[in-house]
Structures are given as structure tokens and as C-alpha cells.
């Protein structure tokens, strides 16, 4: 019996890694492009770096709202695949197409209509606002293909296909990098290995970066739509493309709390960044650079979360209580171990990474980047635990508790704490930014405690009574 359990756990480990590594690689490539974007833009000026960073959190809000629909379909399709019901999975994919079209058109109108107001709401310096408006408008002009990339990618992962979204991400990132190089910088003579040559360029600066991203996202949206249409398991071909409430109702029951969670937390990110922007361009630039650097070190966590959500949904669909418990026992130590390693690397690599991205910024920017990155590195293992438990809850459709945990922590700890600190105690760029990131770390630690209680009590697992 013990040998059989060992073989089962080894087989499950292989399945976990087969699902997780393409997602990790995809996120690694996305982060590499963010690194390259940040390095290219930061080489221009502090103001242009601030124009990009000032709208980043609004982008998280938009992406989070769209991703919530993907979570709803992930839960439904993962359970259908676990029950080996391909017809239900294909019908759900057709509904995902309907939702993508609706959300893409609606969000295009909203984002473009509000592009001039976003920099004002974000308290960006007056001389940066016109550039930030142009950047935001161009970036979210292709909102429909952006929605397709997010939702259709989640549908494919729910069916156990994490390699296709990875391939799409590779092409999107390659296109983005090449176009960045051609559009951001002017035509320049360069020397390499003793050879002098001319590299063409449009010299469009931040506007060029936005155009490059918009083109890359459009290509990605078209590509992933074509792949989904031909997919052997979840292709929507032959299905009806009109609202089917037998699918949309349970999907929205899962998606709505997740959407409210993402809206509440993303709006919190906007408020958080707005308070930091009020500290001046140096704080805005340092915050933007630190966010970009930090994102690479969360890759192991979110890669494993995708696998956890998919496999938990499969186990729930198959009504396999034993597999559900073993999944949790395997995922959590793997995740925490990865995040300890990741946090250690972030702590020791903070100085050279800050030097890379803030080389042409004001000296205070580099100092602040190092400080806040080393602070947050300590909290990564705790946050990793929260990510895994939340991922399993998403897979089985339990999204109400994560909604309450995340929104309460965001607004009662991070936002309220930052407002008190930056309003009454730390008003300069340096101490204000450090205090704000300390409040963010306190928020992450609170999430760890809440999800730990949820895990110990077993409320995350709908099959616990079995």
C-alpha cells in the first residue's frame, strides 16, 4: 500500500510540474519583457518613467476585472474535464467567446473614454499628465484582443494545456521587444566587436513603447483565438454562440466574488500608487521599478497556483476526496520552498538589479528601490502559502472567502495604514515610500494568517466530509 501511494504521489508530482513549468516560463518571459521595457524607458528620463509607472496599477485593475471571468470558466471547465464531460467543456468555451466579445467591447469604450482622467486621478505631476494620457490610450486601444488573450488562455489552462498560452506569450514578447527597440529610440550608430553599424529607430520614446505593446497584444489575441478554435478538447466549433444561462449562472457565481476581489484589491493598488505618486516623481519612479523587479520573483508562486487551481478543479469534478487532500499536502511545501529560494535571491540581488534599472535615475531612486525590495523579500514565503490555498479554492469554485480576505486586508491594512503614514508621519519621498511598502508587507502577512486558518479548518475543501 505504501509503495502504491508513493507511486501515485510521484505521478502526481509529474502532473503538477507538467502543468506548472509552461506557466512559469510564460510569466518569466513576460517579466523579462517588463524588465526590458523598464530599462529602455528608464534610460529616457524620470518624467517618462513616471508617465509609464503612473498608469501601471490602473492596468492591473483592468486586467484583474477581465481575469475574473477567466477564473469562473476555469472552475467550470476544470470540473467538466475532471468528470470527462467534453461536451460541457466545449459549450463552456463557446460561452467564454460570448463573454470575451462583450467584455472586450465594453472595456474598450471605458478605458479610452477615461484615458484623460486617469493621470489626474493618479495625482501625476502636471507636466507628466499629457504623456501618461497618450501612453494609456494607445496601450488599451486593442482591449478586445487583450481580453481574448487573458480569458482564452485561462480556458486552455483549465483543460490542462499550459503550453499553448506559453507559446503565444513567447511570440507576443518577441514582437514587443523588437518593436520597442525600433520605436523608442532614434536612428543611432552603434559599435559592436569593432564594427560600426546604424540601427534604425523612430525615436518616439514612451509613445513608441505603447505602440509596440499594443501591436504585440493584438497579435497575441488573434493567435490564441485561432489556436482555441482548433483545439481538440475545448474547441467551440459547432456550439451555439448565444447566452446559455445553465453555464453562465454557475460561472458567474464563481466569477463575481473573484471580480469584486480583483476590483477591490486593484482599486486599492490604484489608491496605493496614487498616494505614492503624491510623494513626487522620484517615489513614483522607484515604486514602478521595484514593482517590475519584484514581479519576477513571484513567478514560482503564480505558476504553481495555476496548476493547483486546475488539479483541484479536476479532483472536485471527479469527486476524489483523497486526491484533493494529497494535492494540498504536496503543493504547499513545494510552494513555500520555492518562495524561500525566490525571496533569498531577491534580497541579495536587489542592489545590482536596482543599479540596472535606475542607473540614469536620480540617486535617491536607486537607494529606495534597494530598500523596499529587501524589505518585501522577507515576506515572500508567507505570501506563497496564501497563493496556493487561494488557487485551490478558485479551482473548486470557492471564491467568497478569498474576496473577503483580500479586500479587507487591502483597505484596512495597506490603504488605511499608508494614508495615515504618508499624511501624518512620513511626507517625504524616502520615508513615505518605505512606510507604504511596510504597510504592503503587513497586508501580505495578514493574508497568510487568514488562509492558514482556512486551511487548518478545512473550509477550503468542499470534499472534506468524505
Image: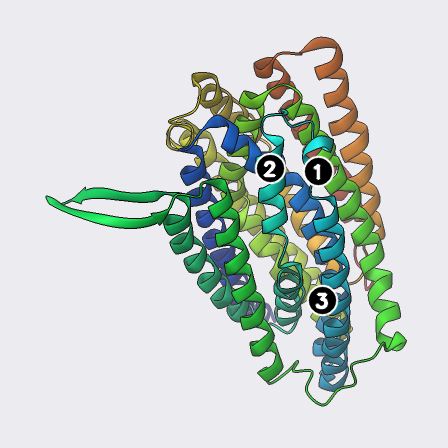
What secondary structure is marked by label 1?
Answer: helix
Identify the residue at the far top of this view. Answer: 425
According to the image, label 3 marks what residue?
74
Question: Which of pointers 2 and 3 indicates the residue nearer the eye?
Answer: 2
According to the image, label 2 marks what residue?
132
According to the image, label 1 marks what residue?
118
* The C terminus: image quadrant: bottom right
Return the residue nearer the eye: 88 or 83. 88
Q: Is residue 278 above or below residue 24?
A: above
Disc on the earlier residue, 1 or 2: 1
Give the image location of residue 349, x and y in percent.
41, 32
Residue occupying image coordinates x 44% and y 36% = 345
Residue 393 in view (yes/no): no
Give the image location of residue 3, x and y in percent.
55, 70
* The N terminus: image quadrant: bottom right
What secondary structure is marked by label 2?
Answer: helix
Amino acid at each position: 500500500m505504501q509503495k502504491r501511494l508513493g507511486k501515485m504521489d510521484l505521478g502526481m508530482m509529474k502532473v503538477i510540474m507538467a502543468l506548472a513549468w509552461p506557466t512559469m516560463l510564460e510569466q518569466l518571459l513576460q517579466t523579462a519583457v517588463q524588465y526590458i521595457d523598464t530599462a529602455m524607458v528608464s534610460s529616457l528620463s524620470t518624467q517618462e518613467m513616471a508617465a509609464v509607472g503612473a498608469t501601471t496599477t490602473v492596468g492591473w485593475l483592468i486586467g484583474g476585472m477581465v481575469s475574473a471571468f477567466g477564473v469562473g470558466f476555469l472552475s467550470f471547465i476544470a470540473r467538466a474535464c475532471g468528470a470527462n464531460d467534453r461536451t460541457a467543456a466545449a459549450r463552456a468555451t463557446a460561452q467564454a467567446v460570448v463573454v470575451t466579445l462583450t467584455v472586450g467591447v465594453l472595456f474598450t469604450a471605458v478605458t479610452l473614454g477615461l484615458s484623460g482622467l486617469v493621470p489626474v486621478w493618479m495625482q501625476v505631476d502636471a507636466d507628466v499628465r499629457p504623456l501618461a494620457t497618450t501612453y494609456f490610450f494607445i496601450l488599451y486601444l486593442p482591449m478586445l484582443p487583450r481580453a481574448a488573450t487573458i480569458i482564452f488562455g485561462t480556458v486552455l489552462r483549465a483543460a490542462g494545456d499550459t503550453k499553448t498560452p506559453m507559446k503565444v506569450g513567447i511570440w507576443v514578447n518577441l514582437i514587443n521587444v523588437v518593436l520597442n527597440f525600433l520605436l523608442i529610440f532614434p536612428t543611432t550608430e552603434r559599435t559592436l566587436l569593432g564594427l560600426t553599424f546604424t540601427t534604425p529607430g523612430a525615436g518616439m520614446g514612451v509613445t513608441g513603447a505603447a505602440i509596440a505593446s499594443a501591436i504585440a497584444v493584438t497579435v497575441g489575441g488573434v493567435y490564441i483565438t485561432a489556436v482555441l478554435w482548433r483545439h481538440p478538447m475545448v474547441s467551440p466549433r459547432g456550439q451555439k454562440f448565444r447566452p446559455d444561462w445553465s453555464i453562465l449562472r454557475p460561472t458567474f457565481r464563481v466569477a463575481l466574488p473573484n471580480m469584486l476581489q480583483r476590483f477591490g484589491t486593484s482599486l486599492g493598488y490604484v489608491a496605493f500608487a496614487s498616494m505614492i505618486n503624491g510623494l513626487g516623481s522620484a517615489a513614483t519612479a522607484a515604486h514602478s521599478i521595484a514593482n517590475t523587479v519584484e514581479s519576477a520573483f513571484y513567478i514560482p508562486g503564480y505558476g504553481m497556483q495555476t496548476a493547483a487551481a486546475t488539479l483541484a478543479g479536476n479532483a472536485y469534478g471527479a469527486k476524489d476526496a483523497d486526491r484533493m487532500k494529497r494535492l494540498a499536502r504536496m503543493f504547499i511545501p513545494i510552494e513555500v520552498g520555492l518562495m524561500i529560494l525566490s525571496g533569498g535571491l531577491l534580497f541579495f540581488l536587489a542592489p545590482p538589479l536596482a543599479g540596472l534599472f535606475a542607473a540614469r535615475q536620480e540617486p535617491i531612486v536607486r537607494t529606495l528601490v534597494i530598500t523596499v525590495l529587501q524589505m518585501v523579500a522577507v515576506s515572500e514565503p508567507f505570501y506563497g502559502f496564501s497563493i496556493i490555498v487561494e488557487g485551490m479554492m478558485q479551482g473548486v469554485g470557492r471564491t467568497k472567502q478569498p474576496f473577503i480576505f483580500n479586500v479587507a486586508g487591502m483597505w484596512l491594512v495597506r490603504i488605511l495604514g499608508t494614508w495615515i503614514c504618508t499624511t501624518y508621519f512620513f511626507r517625504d519621498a524616502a520615508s513615505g515610500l518605505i512606510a507604504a511598502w511596510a504597510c504592503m508587507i503587513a497586508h501580505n502577512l495578514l493574508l497568510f494568517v487568514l488562509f492558514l486558518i482556512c486551511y487548518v479548518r478545512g473550509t477550503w475543501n468542499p470534499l472534506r466530509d468524505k
